Image: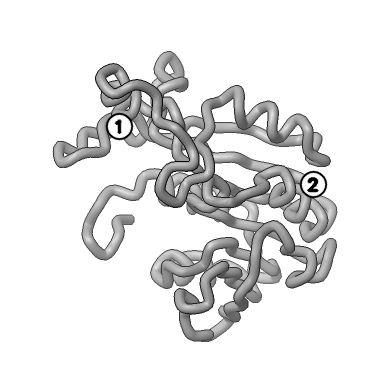
Amino acid sequence: MTSPKNQPTYDWDHLMATYRRYVHNTSLVVEVGASTPYRTLNLAPYCRQLIGVEYYQQRLPQDTANIHYIQGDWQHLSGLIKPNSADIVVSSHVIEHVLDDAQAISETYRDLRPGGVAIITTPNRQRLIRKLIEAFTGPRQFPHWEHQREYNFEDLSKLLSCSAFKEFSITPVSFGINSRLKLYLKKCPLIFKDYACFWEILLIK
């Protein structure tokens, strides 16, 4: 699968493969950061209902089929979604934008039903291209642009270990250089996991 501009989306492909392992046609799915319609449309055929939560009102798409969009903040998700009701929460490249990431994870826990899962992707702060650039420029300081922070493996482990989730995994996704060259491996060799392009987080309630 590629984006409409035919750019590699290996992290999204990986997320979809994980999603298909857990979703059922009876599932209630919540997508946090639902401003990219083609991705939401990828998720929707596998579930009973999809609620797309988008922070920016002006980015809200139109409802369609089994998709209903609402404006809201991940940090206050339980005020939007009935607690203990969602089967799956999906979020791609959002958590690095959230002011209080621990609160977002806490809200995710509240809204998932027992046995429900969350699948979250985010860029790796130590991805290869950043390490190469920072060898000349020095470490990037955050906040940067819209990112409040980015994570290495230890950052995510600490964040999740302090949450209510007792079962979670952090998987490195893709390895290479995201530039005009677009030199990627879809699967990150474990020996290079610290320099993967992305992280995929799986949380199980």
Q: Are marks 1 and 2 in contact (CB under 8 Å)?
A: no
The residue under the point 65% across, 64% down is 73
Is residue 82 toward the left or the right of residue 71 in the image? right
Q: How is the image coloured?
A: one colour
Q: Secondary structure at mark 2?
A: loop
Which one is nearer the viewer's eye here, 201 or 124?
Answer: 124
Q: Residues within 10 Å of mark 2 (few under 14, many from 20)?
A: many
In this rendering, the count of numbered labels is 2
Quarter of the figure with the N terminus: bottom left
Is residue 23 toward the left or the right of residue 10 in the image? right
What residue type is disc 1 on? Leu
Q: Secondary structure at mark 1?
A: strand
Q: Name the residue carrying label 2.
A: 205
The residue under the point 45% across, 22% down is 193
**Image location (x, y in percent) of residue 66:** 58, 81
Q: CA distance from mark 1 to mark 2?
A: 31 Å
**Image location (x, y in percent) of residue 58:** 46, 78
Looking at this rendering, what residue extends furthest in the left direction? 181
The residue under the point 59% across, 56% down is 90
Q: Name the residue carrying label 1.
A: 185
User: Residue 39: which quarter of the image?
Assistant: bottom left
The residue under the point 48% across, 50% down is 93
**Image location (x, y in percent) of residue 47:** 61, 69
Which one is nearer the viewer's eye here, 92 or 115?
Answer: 92
> Looking at the image, is mark 1 or mark 2 earlier in the sequence?
1
**Image location (x, y in percent) of residue 51:** 63, 73
What residue type is disc 2 on? Lys
Q: Residues within 10 Å of mark 1 (few under 14, many from 20)?
A: some
